[in-house]
Amino acid sequence: HDLELSESGFDDADSPDGTVEVRVPLMQGRVDVKLERVELGLAKARLVIREAIRNKDKRPPLTDRDYVPVGPVYRNAYAFHRSYLEMEKLFKVYVYEEGEPPVFHDGPCRSIYSSEGRFIFAMEMENRMRTRDPELAHVFFLPFSVVKMVKMIYEPNSHDMEPLRRTLSDYIDVLSTKYPYWNRSLGADHFMLSCHDWGPYVSSADGHLFSNSIRVLCNANTSEGFNPSKDVSLPEINLRTDIVDNQVGGPSASRRPILAFFAGGDHGPVRPLLLRHWKGKDADVQVSEYLPRGVSYINVMRRSKFCLCPSGYEVASPRVVEAIYLECVPVVIGDDYVLPFSDVLNWPAFSVRVAVADIPNLKTILAAVSPRQYIRMQRRVRTVRRHFMVNGPPRRFDVFHMILHSIWLRRLNVRLHGQD
Ligand SMILES: *[C@@H]1O[C@H](CO)[C@@H](O)[C@H](O)[C@H]1NC(C)=O
Ligand SMILES: *[C@@H]1O[C@H](CO)[C@@H](O)[C@H](O)[C@H]1NC(C)=O
Protein backbone atom coordinates (compact mmCIF):
# COMPACT_ATOMS: atom_id res chain seq x y z
CA HIS A 1 0.00 0.00 0.00
CA ASP A 2 1.84 3.03 -1.18
CA LEU A 3 -0.82 5.40 -2.28
CA GLU A 4 -0.26 9.04 -1.72
CA LEU A 5 -3.37 10.73 -3.01
CA SER A 6 -6.83 10.37 -1.62
CA GLU A 7 -9.48 8.81 -3.77
CA SER A 8 -10.57 11.95 -5.48
CA GLY A 9 -8.05 14.58 -4.60
CA PHE A 10 -6.02 16.26 -1.91
CA ASP A 11 -6.97 15.94 1.68
CA ASP A 12 -5.33 17.36 4.71
CA ALA A 13 -6.13 14.19 6.60
CA ASP A 14 -4.13 11.06 5.93
CA SER A 15 -5.27 9.72 2.60
CA PRO A 16 -6.99 6.38 2.28
CA ASP A 17 -5.36 4.04 -0.17
CA GLY A 18 -7.24 4.50 -3.40
CA THR A 19 -4.65 3.31 -5.90
CA VAL A 20 -6.03 0.88 -8.41
CA GLU A 21 -3.44 -1.65 -9.47
CA VAL A 22 -3.83 -3.01 -12.97
CA ARG A 23 -1.82 -6.10 -13.89
CA VAL A 24 -0.65 -5.94 -17.47
CA PRO A 25 -0.29 -9.21 -19.36
CA LEU A 26 3.29 -9.77 -20.47
CA MET A 27 3.79 -9.56 -24.19
CA GLN A 28 5.56 -12.72 -25.29
CA GLY A 29 6.90 -13.15 -21.80
CA ARG A 30 8.86 -9.88 -21.91
CA VAL A 31 8.71 -7.05 -19.46
CA ASP A 32 7.39 -3.89 -21.11
CA VAL A 33 10.41 -1.67 -20.52
CA LYS A 34 8.79 1.47 -21.89
CA LEU A 35 5.74 1.03 -19.70
CA GLU A 36 7.99 0.50 -16.70
CA ARG A 37 9.74 3.76 -17.50
CA VAL A 38 6.39 5.60 -17.78
CA GLU A 39 5.31 4.13 -14.44
CA LEU A 40 8.62 5.04 -12.80
CA GLY A 41 8.08 8.68 -13.75
CA LEU A 42 4.61 8.60 -12.21
CA ALA A 43 5.92 6.92 -9.06
CA LYS A 44 8.45 9.73 -8.60
CA ALA A 45 5.74 12.37 -9.10
CA ARG A 46 3.57 10.61 -6.50
CA LEU A 47 6.40 10.78 -3.98
CA VAL A 48 6.97 14.48 -4.57
CA ILE A 49 3.26 15.23 -4.24
CA ARG A 50 2.91 13.08 -1.14
CA GLU A 51 5.76 15.01 0.41
CA ALA A 52 3.98 18.25 -0.45
CA ILE A 53 0.75 17.03 1.15
CA ARG A 54 2.62 16.23 4.37
CA ASN A 55 4.62 19.43 4.55
CA LYS A 56 2.23 22.02 3.31
CA ASP A 57 2.48 24.20 6.43
CA LYS A 58 6.24 24.05 6.79
CA ARG A 59 7.21 25.22 3.34
CA PRO A 60 7.34 28.63 1.76
CA PRO A 61 5.10 28.84 -1.32
CA LEU A 62 6.65 27.58 -4.54
CA THR A 63 7.77 30.21 -6.99
CA ASP A 64 5.85 30.61 -10.20
CA ARG A 65 6.11 33.14 -13.00
CA ASP A 66 2.32 33.32 -13.47
CA TYR A 67 0.38 32.41 -10.39
CA VAL A 68 0.85 30.99 -6.92
CA PRO A 69 -2.22 29.19 -5.54
CA VAL A 70 -2.74 30.17 -1.89
CA GLY A 71 -5.57 30.43 0.59
CA PRO A 72 -8.78 28.75 1.62
CA VAL A 73 -10.24 28.28 -1.89
CA TYR A 74 -7.92 25.28 -2.20
CA ARG A 75 -8.13 22.01 -0.31
CA ASN A 76 -4.35 22.08 -0.16
CA ALA A 77 -2.88 24.96 -2.17
CA TYR A 78 0.74 23.86 -1.77
CA ALA A 79 0.12 20.27 -2.86
CA PHE A 80 -1.97 21.47 -5.79
CA HIS A 81 0.83 23.73 -6.97
CA ARG A 82 3.41 20.97 -6.60
CA SER A 83 1.20 18.56 -8.49
CA TYR A 84 0.49 21.11 -11.21
CA LEU A 85 4.21 21.72 -11.75
CA GLU A 86 4.87 17.97 -11.85
CA MET A 87 2.13 17.63 -14.45
CA GLU A 88 3.71 20.30 -16.62
CA LYS A 89 7.08 18.59 -16.37
CA LEU A 90 5.97 15.06 -17.04
CA PHE A 91 2.44 14.48 -18.29
CA LYS A 92 1.98 13.20 -21.84
CA VAL A 93 -1.33 12.55 -23.55
CA TYR A 94 -1.65 10.51 -26.72
CA VAL A 95 -4.62 11.40 -28.93
CA TYR A 96 -5.75 8.55 -31.17
CA GLU A 97 -5.69 9.70 -34.79
CA GLU A 98 -8.40 7.31 -35.99
CA GLY A 99 -11.89 8.63 -36.73
CA GLU A 100 -13.15 11.30 -39.10
CA PRO A 101 -14.62 14.70 -38.24
CA PRO A 102 -17.21 15.81 -37.31
CA VAL A 103 -17.93 12.91 -34.95
CA PHE A 104 -14.22 12.58 -34.11
CA HIS A 105 -11.61 15.33 -33.70
CA ASP A 106 -14.34 17.98 -33.70
CA GLY A 107 -16.97 19.31 -31.31
CA PRO A 108 -19.18 22.30 -30.46
CA CYS A 109 -17.31 25.45 -29.45
CA ARG A 110 -20.39 27.48 -28.58
CA SER A 111 -23.65 26.62 -26.76
CA ILE A 112 -24.00 24.98 -23.37
CA TYR A 113 -21.92 22.07 -24.62
CA SER A 114 -18.92 24.19 -25.59
CA SER A 115 -16.64 22.55 -22.99
CA GLU A 116 -16.67 19.45 -25.18
CA GLY A 117 -15.50 21.09 -28.40
CA ARG A 118 -13.12 23.51 -26.70
CA PHE A 119 -11.27 20.70 -24.98
CA ILE A 120 -11.06 18.55 -28.11
CA PHE A 121 -9.67 21.48 -30.13
CA ALA A 122 -7.25 22.55 -27.43
CA MET A 123 -6.01 18.97 -27.16
CA GLU A 124 -5.50 18.79 -30.93
CA MET A 125 -3.41 21.98 -30.74
CA GLU A 126 -1.54 21.04 -27.57
CA ASN A 127 2.22 20.58 -27.81
CA ARG A 128 3.66 20.45 -24.34
CA MET A 129 1.48 17.85 -22.69
CA ARG A 130 0.97 15.76 -25.77
CA THR A 131 3.03 13.06 -27.40
CA ARG A 132 2.85 11.56 -30.88
CA ASP A 133 4.55 8.43 -29.56
CA PRO A 134 2.04 6.20 -27.73
CA GLU A 135 4.91 4.41 -26.00
CA LEU A 136 5.60 7.59 -24.03
CA ALA A 137 1.98 8.32 -23.12
CA HIS A 138 0.55 8.32 -19.61
CA VAL A 139 -3.00 8.53 -20.89
CA PHE A 140 -4.77 7.94 -24.20
CA PHE A 141 -7.57 10.25 -25.36
CA LEU A 142 -10.58 8.94 -27.30
CA PRO A 143 -11.42 12.11 -29.26
CA PHE A 144 -15.12 11.61 -30.00
CA SER A 145 -17.91 14.13 -29.50
CA VAL A 146 -21.28 12.91 -28.24
CA VAL A 147 -22.78 16.27 -29.27
CA LYS A 148 -21.65 15.68 -32.86
CA MET A 149 -22.89 12.09 -32.73
CA VAL A 150 -26.31 13.34 -31.72
CA LYS A 151 -26.23 15.78 -34.60
CA MET A 152 -24.96 13.36 -37.24
CA ILE A 153 -26.15 9.90 -36.20
CA TYR A 154 -29.18 10.26 -33.94
CA GLU A 155 -32.62 10.05 -35.56
CA PRO A 156 -34.54 12.98 -34.01
CA ASN A 157 -37.36 11.90 -31.68
CA SER A 158 -36.49 8.24 -32.14
CA HIS A 159 -35.33 7.89 -28.51
CA ASP A 160 -32.91 5.33 -29.93
CA MET A 161 -29.35 5.82 -28.73
CA GLU A 162 -28.14 2.45 -29.99
CA PRO A 163 -26.51 3.89 -33.15
CA LEU A 164 -24.46 6.23 -30.94
CA ARG A 165 -23.43 3.42 -28.66
CA ARG A 166 -22.51 1.23 -31.63
CA THR A 167 -20.33 4.00 -33.09
CA LEU A 168 -18.41 4.15 -29.84
CA SER A 169 -18.01 0.41 -29.32
CA ASP A 170 -16.91 0.00 -32.97
CA TYR A 171 -14.32 2.71 -32.39
CA ILE A 172 -12.92 0.96 -29.34
CA ASP A 173 -12.88 -2.33 -31.29
CA VAL A 174 -10.78 -0.68 -33.99
CA LEU A 175 -8.31 0.82 -31.51
CA SER A 176 -8.01 -2.31 -29.41
CA THR A 177 -7.31 -4.43 -32.48
CA LYS A 178 -4.82 -2.04 -34.03
CA TYR A 179 -2.88 -1.11 -30.86
CA PRO A 180 -1.92 -3.00 -27.70
CA TYR A 181 -2.77 -0.17 -25.29
CA TRP A 182 -6.46 -0.70 -24.67
CA ASN A 183 -6.14 -4.40 -23.91
CA ARG A 184 -3.05 -3.79 -21.80
CA SER A 185 -4.96 -1.83 -19.15
CA LEU A 186 -8.56 -2.62 -20.14
CA GLY A 187 -9.06 1.11 -20.59
CA ALA A 188 -7.71 2.24 -17.21
CA ASP A 189 -5.20 4.66 -18.79
CA HIS A 190 -7.70 5.95 -21.38
CA PHE A 191 -10.05 8.90 -21.11
CA MET A 192 -13.12 10.25 -22.85
CA LEU A 193 -14.80 13.63 -22.44
CA SER A 194 -18.38 14.75 -22.98
CA CYS A 195 -20.59 17.59 -21.91
CA HIS A 196 -23.74 16.12 -23.43
CA ASP A 197 -26.51 14.88 -21.11
CA TRP A 198 -26.24 11.50 -22.80
CA GLY A 199 -22.44 11.20 -22.34
CA PRO A 200 -22.73 8.76 -19.42
CA TYR A 201 -25.25 6.55 -21.20
CA VAL A 202 -23.26 6.46 -24.44
CA SER A 203 -20.12 5.61 -22.43
CA SER A 204 -21.88 2.52 -21.07
CA ALA A 205 -21.68 1.02 -24.60
CA ASP A 206 -18.35 -0.44 -23.48
CA GLY A 207 -18.22 -1.98 -20.02
CA HIS A 208 -14.50 -1.30 -19.58
CA LEU A 209 -14.85 2.30 -20.70
CA PHE A 210 -17.64 2.78 -18.17
CA SER A 211 -16.00 1.09 -15.22
CA ASN A 212 -12.23 1.45 -15.83
CA SER A 213 -11.58 4.52 -17.97
CA ILE A 214 -11.43 8.12 -16.83
CA ARG A 215 -14.73 9.63 -17.96
CA VAL A 216 -14.71 13.42 -18.04
CA LEU A 217 -18.38 14.41 -17.87
CA CYS A 218 -20.58 17.45 -17.33
CA ASN A 219 -23.32 15.07 -16.27
CA ALA A 220 -21.43 14.01 -13.14
CA ASN A 221 -24.35 12.28 -11.46
CA THR A 222 -23.23 9.89 -8.73
CA SER A 223 -26.55 8.06 -9.00
CA GLU A 224 -25.72 7.21 -12.61
CA GLY A 225 -22.34 5.60 -12.04
CA PHE A 226 -20.18 8.72 -11.85
CA ASN A 227 -17.26 7.68 -9.66
CA PRO A 228 -15.28 10.65 -8.29
CA SER A 229 -12.17 8.57 -7.63
CA LYS A 230 -11.73 7.79 -11.34
CA ASP A 231 -14.08 10.10 -13.28
CA VAL A 232 -13.72 13.88 -13.70
CA SER A 233 -16.48 16.47 -13.40
CA LEU A 234 -16.33 18.80 -16.41
CA PRO A 235 -17.64 22.36 -15.99
CA GLU A 236 -20.55 23.24 -18.22
CA ILE A 237 -19.86 26.62 -19.81
CA ASN A 238 -22.36 28.37 -22.04
CA LEU A 239 -20.26 30.27 -24.56
CA ARG A 240 -22.19 32.49 -26.91
CA THR A 241 -19.23 34.15 -28.57
CA ASP A 242 -15.52 33.58 -28.77
CA ILE A 243 -14.84 36.45 -26.42
CA VAL A 244 -15.39 35.44 -22.85
CA ASP A 245 -14.05 38.69 -21.41
CA ASN A 246 -17.31 40.61 -21.74
CA GLN A 247 -19.09 37.96 -19.66
CA VAL A 248 -16.69 38.61 -16.79
CA GLY A 249 -16.71 40.90 -13.74
CA GLY A 250 -19.32 42.45 -11.45
CA PRO A 251 -19.91 44.97 -8.66
CA SER A 252 -19.22 44.61 -4.94
CA ALA A 253 -21.76 43.37 -2.41
CA SER A 254 -23.12 46.83 -1.56
CA ARG A 255 -24.31 47.25 -5.15
CA ARG A 256 -26.17 43.94 -5.19
CA PRO A 257 -29.66 44.64 -3.76
CA ILE A 258 -31.19 41.23 -4.61
CA LEU A 259 -30.45 38.43 -2.14
CA ALA A 260 -30.95 35.50 -4.53
CA PHE A 261 -31.87 35.10 -8.18
CA PHE A 262 -32.90 32.40 -10.61
CA ALA A 263 -34.62 32.52 -13.98
CA GLY A 264 -34.84 29.42 -16.12
CA GLY A 265 -36.92 26.61 -17.56
CA ASP A 266 -39.07 24.43 -15.34
CA HIS A 267 -37.54 21.08 -16.17
CA GLY A 268 -35.70 18.21 -14.53
CA PRO A 269 -36.29 16.94 -11.02
CA VAL A 270 -35.19 19.97 -8.95
CA ARG A 271 -36.55 23.12 -10.55
CA PRO A 272 -40.26 22.37 -10.11
CA LEU A 273 -39.66 22.31 -6.36
CA LEU A 274 -37.71 25.56 -6.44
CA LEU A 275 -40.39 27.30 -8.50
CA ARG A 276 -43.24 25.94 -6.40
CA HIS A 277 -41.67 27.24 -3.19
CA TRP A 278 -40.27 30.55 -4.32
CA LYS A 279 -41.79 31.84 -7.54
CA GLY A 280 -43.45 35.19 -6.82
CA LYS A 281 -43.24 34.65 -3.06
CA ASP A 282 -40.51 36.95 -1.81
CA ALA A 283 -38.87 40.10 -3.16
CA ASP A 284 -35.46 39.00 -1.81
CA VAL A 285 -35.55 35.62 -3.53
CA GLN A 286 -36.34 36.32 -7.18
CA VAL A 287 -37.23 33.04 -8.81
CA SER A 288 -39.10 32.75 -12.10
CA GLU A 289 -39.17 30.92 -15.41
CA TYR A 290 -38.85 34.01 -17.57
CA LEU A 291 -37.49 37.49 -17.18
CA PRO A 292 -39.68 40.43 -18.20
CA ARG A 293 -39.02 41.68 -21.72
CA GLY A 294 -36.00 43.97 -21.89
CA VAL A 295 -34.47 42.77 -18.63
CA SER A 296 -30.99 41.33 -19.09
CA TYR A 297 -30.24 38.07 -17.37
CA ILE A 298 -26.60 39.00 -16.92
CA ASN A 299 -27.50 42.35 -15.37
CA VAL A 300 -29.80 40.74 -12.82
CA MET A 301 -27.03 38.30 -11.92
CA ARG A 302 -24.74 41.28 -11.41
CA ARG A 303 -27.30 42.85 -9.04
CA SER A 304 -27.70 39.66 -7.00
CA LYS A 305 -25.62 38.48 -4.06
CA PHE A 306 -26.36 34.82 -4.61
CA CYS A 307 -27.08 33.14 -7.93
CA LEU A 308 -29.16 29.99 -7.67
CA CYS A 309 -27.90 27.07 -9.78
CA PRO A 310 -30.44 24.26 -9.57
CA SER A 311 -29.88 21.12 -11.63
CA GLY A 312 -31.88 21.02 -14.85
CA TYR A 313 -32.40 18.02 -17.12
CA GLU A 314 -29.16 16.76 -15.66
CA VAL A 315 -27.04 17.61 -12.65
CA ALA A 316 -24.70 20.27 -14.09
CA SER A 317 -25.80 23.84 -14.75
CA PRO A 318 -23.95 26.45 -16.82
CA ARG A 319 -25.08 28.95 -14.18
CA VAL A 320 -22.33 27.88 -11.80
CA VAL A 321 -19.60 29.18 -14.11
CA GLU A 322 -21.75 32.16 -15.18
CA ALA A 323 -22.10 33.14 -11.53
CA ILE A 324 -18.36 32.78 -10.98
CA TYR A 325 -17.66 34.96 -14.04
CA LEU A 326 -20.05 37.66 -12.77
CA GLU A 327 -18.76 37.52 -9.17
CA CYS A 328 -22.08 36.31 -7.82
CA VAL A 329 -21.73 33.61 -5.14
CA PRO A 330 -23.14 30.38 -6.62
CA VAL A 331 -25.75 28.40 -4.73
CA VAL A 332 -25.68 24.83 -6.00
CA ILE A 333 -29.02 23.09 -5.52
CA GLY A 334 -29.08 19.35 -6.16
CA ASP A 335 -28.06 16.15 -4.46
CA ASP A 336 -26.17 13.89 -6.84
CA TYR A 337 -23.75 16.39 -8.36
CA VAL A 338 -19.97 16.22 -7.97
CA LEU A 339 -18.69 19.76 -8.55
CA PRO A 340 -15.85 20.41 -11.04
CA PHE A 341 -12.29 20.40 -9.65
CA SER A 342 -13.50 19.35 -6.22
CA ASP A 343 -10.27 17.35 -6.11
CA VAL A 344 -8.44 20.68 -5.75
CA LEU A 345 -10.96 23.39 -4.90
CA ASN A 346 -12.59 23.84 -1.51
CA TRP A 347 -16.07 24.72 -2.79
CA PRO A 348 -17.62 25.60 0.59
CA ALA A 349 -15.20 28.56 0.80
CA PHE A 350 -16.80 30.30 -2.18
CA SER A 351 -20.20 28.72 -2.78
CA VAL A 352 -23.25 27.47 -0.92
CA ARG A 353 -24.61 23.97 -1.33
CA VAL A 354 -28.32 23.45 -0.66
CA ALA A 355 -29.88 19.99 -0.56
CA VAL A 356 -33.12 19.57 -2.45
CA ALA A 357 -34.87 18.87 0.85
CA ASP A 358 -33.71 22.30 2.09
CA ILE A 359 -35.26 24.33 -0.73
CA PRO A 360 -37.98 25.65 1.64
CA ASN A 361 -35.19 26.98 3.92
CA LEU A 362 -33.29 28.73 1.14
CA LYS A 363 -33.83 32.26 2.41
CA THR A 364 -32.94 31.35 6.00
CA ILE A 365 -29.74 29.64 4.84
CA LEU A 366 -28.60 32.57 2.69
CA ALA A 367 -29.67 35.27 5.15
CA ALA A 368 -27.50 33.55 7.76
CA VAL A 369 -24.37 34.42 5.77
CA SER A 370 -23.06 37.57 7.48
CA PRO A 371 -22.01 40.60 5.38
CA ARG A 372 -18.36 40.01 6.31
CA GLN A 373 -18.58 36.37 5.39
CA TYR A 374 -20.24 37.30 2.12
CA ILE A 375 -17.47 39.75 1.22
CA ARG A 376 -14.90 37.02 1.85
CA MET A 377 -16.79 34.51 -0.28
CA GLN A 378 -17.18 36.96 -3.12
CA ARG A 379 -13.46 37.75 -3.05
CA ARG A 380 -12.74 34.04 -3.29
CA VAL A 381 -15.11 33.69 -6.24
CA ARG A 382 -12.88 36.23 -7.99
CA THR A 383 -9.83 34.14 -7.06
CA VAL A 384 -11.13 30.87 -8.49
CA ARG A 385 -12.37 32.51 -11.65
CA ARG A 386 -9.07 31.95 -13.43
CA HIS A 387 -9.64 28.21 -13.14
CA PHE A 388 -12.85 28.50 -15.15
CA MET A 389 -11.61 30.88 -17.83
CA VAL A 390 -11.67 29.71 -21.43
CA ASN A 391 -8.69 31.05 -23.32
CA GLY A 392 -7.70 30.60 -26.93
CA PRO A 393 -4.94 29.45 -26.87
CA PRO A 394 -5.18 28.04 -23.33
CA ARG A 395 -3.17 29.67 -20.51
CA ARG A 396 -1.68 28.12 -17.39
CA PHE A 397 -4.18 27.38 -14.59
CA ASP A 398 -7.19 28.00 -16.84
CA VAL A 399 -10.08 25.61 -17.40
CA PHE A 400 -8.27 23.51 -20.01
CA HIS A 401 -5.31 22.97 -17.73
CA MET A 402 -7.52 22.30 -14.70
CA ILE A 403 -9.30 19.56 -16.66
CA LEU A 404 -5.93 18.09 -17.62
CA HIS A 405 -4.83 18.32 -14.00
CA SER A 406 -7.90 16.39 -12.85
CA ILE A 407 -7.08 13.71 -15.44
CA TRP A 408 -3.46 13.70 -14.23
CA LEU A 409 -4.59 13.07 -10.64
CA ARG A 410 -6.83 10.19 -11.74
CA ARG A 411 -3.95 8.66 -13.69
CA LEU A 412 -1.71 8.92 -10.64
CA ASN A 413 -4.24 6.74 -8.85
CA VAL A 414 -3.67 3.90 -11.31
CA ARG A 415 -0.57 1.73 -11.44
CA LEU A 416 0.10 -0.47 -14.39
CA HIS A 417 2.63 -3.21 -14.08
CA GLY A 418 3.64 -6.38 -15.82
CA GLN A 419 2.52 -9.71 -14.42
CA ASP A 420 5.06 -11.96 -12.86
C1 LIG B 1 -7.50 -7.16 -27.77
O1 LIG B 1 -8.51 -8.02 -27.30
C2 LIG B 1 -9.52 -8.27 -28.26
C3 LIG B 1 -10.63 -9.07 -27.58
O2 LIG B 1 -10.09 -10.07 -26.77
C4 LIG B 1 -8.93 -8.98 -29.46
O3 LIG B 1 -9.93 -9.21 -30.44
C5 LIG B 1 -7.85 -8.09 -30.05
O4 LIG B 1 -7.21 -8.73 -31.15
C6 LIG B 1 -6.81 -7.74 -29.00
N1 LIG B 1 -5.89 -6.77 -29.55
C7 LIG B 1 -4.61 -6.96 -29.71
C8 LIG B 1 -3.82 -5.85 -30.27
O5 LIG B 1 -4.06 -8.02 -29.41
C1 LIG C 1 -29.32 11.65 -11.18
O1 LIG C 1 -29.55 10.31 -11.50
C2 LIG C 1 -30.69 9.73 -10.87
C3 LIG C 1 -30.73 8.27 -11.28
O2 LIG C 1 -30.86 8.14 -12.67
C4 LIG C 1 -31.95 10.48 -11.25
O3 LIG C 1 -33.08 9.94 -10.61
C5 LIG C 1 -31.78 11.96 -10.88
O4 LIG C 1 -32.89 12.67 -11.30
C6 LIG C 1 -30.53 12.51 -11.52
N1 LIG C 1 -30.35 13.87 -11.03
C7 LIG C 1 -30.54 14.93 -11.81
C8 LIG C 1 -30.50 16.22 -11.13
O5 LIG C 1 -30.73 14.85 -13.01
Image (cartoon, helix red, strand yellow):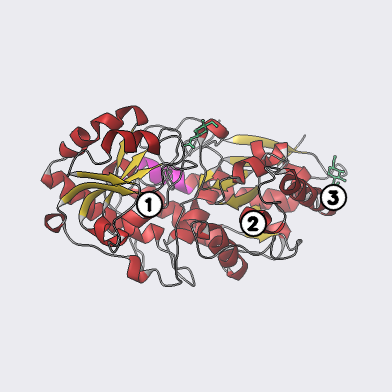
Q: Is residue 212 visible?
A: no
Q: Position of residue 378 (x, y in %)?
A: 22, 52
* Cα–Cα gap, marks 3 and 1: 42 Å
Q: Is residue 217 left or right of residue 49?
A: right
Q: Quadrant of the N terminus?
A: top right
Secondary structure state at the residue bearing disc 3: helix
Which residue in the structure is indicated by mark 3?
A: 177
Residue position marked by numbered label 2 in the rendering: 145
Q: Say what amino acid the circle numbered 1 marks.
A: Arg
- Which contiguous range is marked in magenta? 48-56
Q: Position of residue 212 (x, y in %)?
A: 65, 38
The first of marks 1 and 2 along the sequence is: 2
- Residue designated by label 1: 319
The CA distance from mark 1 to mark 2 is 22 Å
Determine the CA span between mark 2 and mark 3: 22 Å
Q: Is mark 3 within 8 Å of ligand 1?
A: yes
Question: Camera-side residue: 297 or 30?
Answer: 297
Tell me the mark number nearer the camera, choosing from 1 and 2: 1
Camera-side mark, 3 or 1 = 1
Q: Residue at x 70, y 45 (%)?
A: 158
Which quadrant, please, contains the C terminus? top right
Could you say where residue 328 lies in the image, as x and y percent from the top left? 26, 53
Q: Mark 3 or mark 1: which comes first in sequence?
A: 3
